[in-house]
Amino acid sequence: MSYVQILKPHEFKEERGLTTRLGSLDIELTERCNNDCIHCCINLPANDRAAKAREMTTGQIKSILTEAAALGCLQVRFTGGEPLLRIDFEELYLFARRLGLKVLIFTNARLITPQLADLFARIPPLVFIEITVYGMHKKSYEAVSRVPGSFAQFRRGVDLLLERKVPFIVKSALLPPNKTEMEEFEAWANTIPWMEKRPSYSMFFDLRNRRDDEKKNTLIASLRLSPEEGLAVLTRDAANYRKETEKFAGKFMGPPGDAIFECGAGNGLCIDAYGFVQPCMGVRAPELTVDLFRRVASGTMTATDHKKTVIAMNKAGD
């Protein structure tokens, strides 16, 4: 039995104001990363063989992308870890684009090669690539990334995109090694043609999502800005901050009630590197997690199951 049901737009049935169409899809291609950032809640070593062996196969990811497109999804976000570590990244990217999906890529830019930059120029992702910058100088950047040579590789990746006019934006994480570089970072960001507003910052860092490293959790907690420091950064342009907050709240926040979440969690699906789907990458609670691929592989996933999964996730974010 097919687990895909093709519907015309007017045939979607609404459930509490939402439809069963899949609004968005996040796929964490890997938890592995070529950086070892001091604040990261998820990264595993790039050469972690056990993690790599557990990751979804190329075929599994393609099947999820195919299903997502059939459910009306218009965009997928490839994240990680560092998604460009996947040796099949180009294959997955092209597959998603051929399905008609826009592709949002979160990356540190270190693994952008001339070949990959040429691909993005020839077949654009249709969404600005998002690059996280950990410092404006070798000393500050590598104090965060903890990988010698990573700063030069990041700058090379950025230059390759600029040379080919591939649209991207930059963002940062405010940390002790780079906090004094905000003004310099924002002046540089302003030279990037696609930056229409100030770059965003991570400041209140999540602890380890897998709860696998208490020592690192202690470090992460110590790196967070105080509420007063964070508010000072956010409200440098108070009028714009209010405008952006209203826009965010209007899109993601709901009125108080009996919903599990009042944020945007559940408006789309988030699938981790191992094929588990949850309402948000930061939510790993077993009761809110579905071993999606195993159910499909075992032949027990029906059209009704898929529809219920999407509706349940949407209700979670109601």
Image: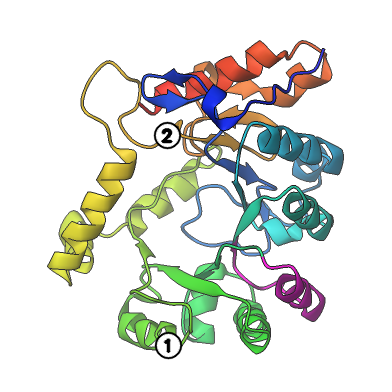
Position in image of residue 56 (x %, y %): 78, 38
Residue 265 marker: 2
Rendered view: 212 above or below 297? below
Q: Amino acid at mark 2?
A: Ala
Residue found 79% across the figure and 45% down from its top = 52
Position in image of residue 206 (x %, y %): 41, 46
Q: Are marks 2 and 1 in contact (CB under 8 Å)?
A: no
Q: Is residue 10 magenta?
A: no
The colouring scheme, among rainbow, by chain, secondary structure or one colour, is rainbow
Q: Earlier in the sequence, mark 2 or mark 1?
A: 1
Q: Is residue 86 visible?
A: yes
Residue found 42% across the figure and 18% down from its top = 15
Q: Is residue 55 visible?
A: no
Q: Is residue 121 magenta?
A: yes
Q: Amino acid at mark 1?
A: Trp
Foreground pick, 250 / 49: 250
Numbered disc 2: secondary structure: loop
Q: Which residues are magenta?
A: 106-124
Residue topped by disc 1: 188
Residue found 74% across the figure and 25% down from its top = 293
In the image: residue 163, left or right of residue 140: right
